[in-house]
Image (cartoon, grey):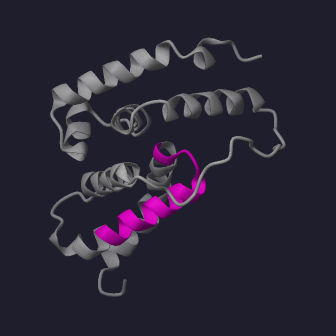
Amino acid sequence: MAERPEFAEFVAARSPVLLRTARLLTGDWASAEDLLQDALAACWRRWSRIEGNPEPYVHRVLVTTYLARRRRFWNREKPTGELPELAVDDASEQVVLQEQVETALRLLTPRQRAVIVLRYYEDLTEAETAKVLGISVGTVKSQASKALARLRVDASLTAEVS
């Protein structure tokens, strides 16, 4: 990275946000780290050709890399159905709610999940989301609408947290 100090600065500054996005897309930290590493490697090779703000380009590479992985017929790792017991601090209700939301996100199609993550977690506008995903603003709106409708009827999200 000695040749591209601006890339190193970008990675140092934006990795936490990009990792969070990757985590929300994949559903677990290990896959998110792998996804982010692959996306950043692809960006590094093209870094000198990126003009202006690199953030939308990197988000697009991250999402397209995620979608390409989801299209594969076989995944090397299979997630387990049982999570190990974790110690919960005072924010246990928030942890339960976050897990419920992430479980509900996994029920969405990959494209719907990408739209929801970029729109509501990354707080991108419809136009920015469309640009990152390479789709029209209308498609962003329709995918977001379908995803939100699906989330509204999810029983795990409508039940009250005790």
Q: Residue 80 in magenta?
A: no
Residue at 64 percent of width and 33 percent of height? 99
Residue 37 in view in this figure = yes
Q: Residue furthest bottom?
A: 2
- Residue 27, image quadrant: top right
Quarter of the image where one finds residue 120: top left
Q: Nearer the viewer, residue 67 or 43?
A: 67
Please provide the residue range marked out in magenta: 25-42
Residue 27 on the magenta segment: yes
Residue 10 at least partly seen:
no
Q: Position of residue 69 (x, y in %)?
A: 39, 55
Q: Of 145 and 15, which appears nearest the observer?
A: 145
Task: Give me the residue at 46% from left, 55% from top.
Answer: 74
Residue 143, horizontal then vertical, whole percent: 29, 26
Image-based side of 50 in relation to 27, left or right? left
Seen as rendered, the residue at the extreme front is: 73
Q: Is residue 97 shown above or below 72?
A: above
The answer to whether 81 appears left or right of 60 in the picture is right
Above or below — where is 161 with respect to 137? above
**Which residue is located at x 51 percent, y 35 percent?**
106
Residue 82 appears at what percent x and percent y? 74, 41
Residue 5 is left or right of residue 131, and the answer is right
Prevailing secondary structure class for the magenta stretch in the rendered image: helix
- Name which residue lies at 57% across and 57% down: 77
In the displayed structure, 160 sits above or below 21; it is above
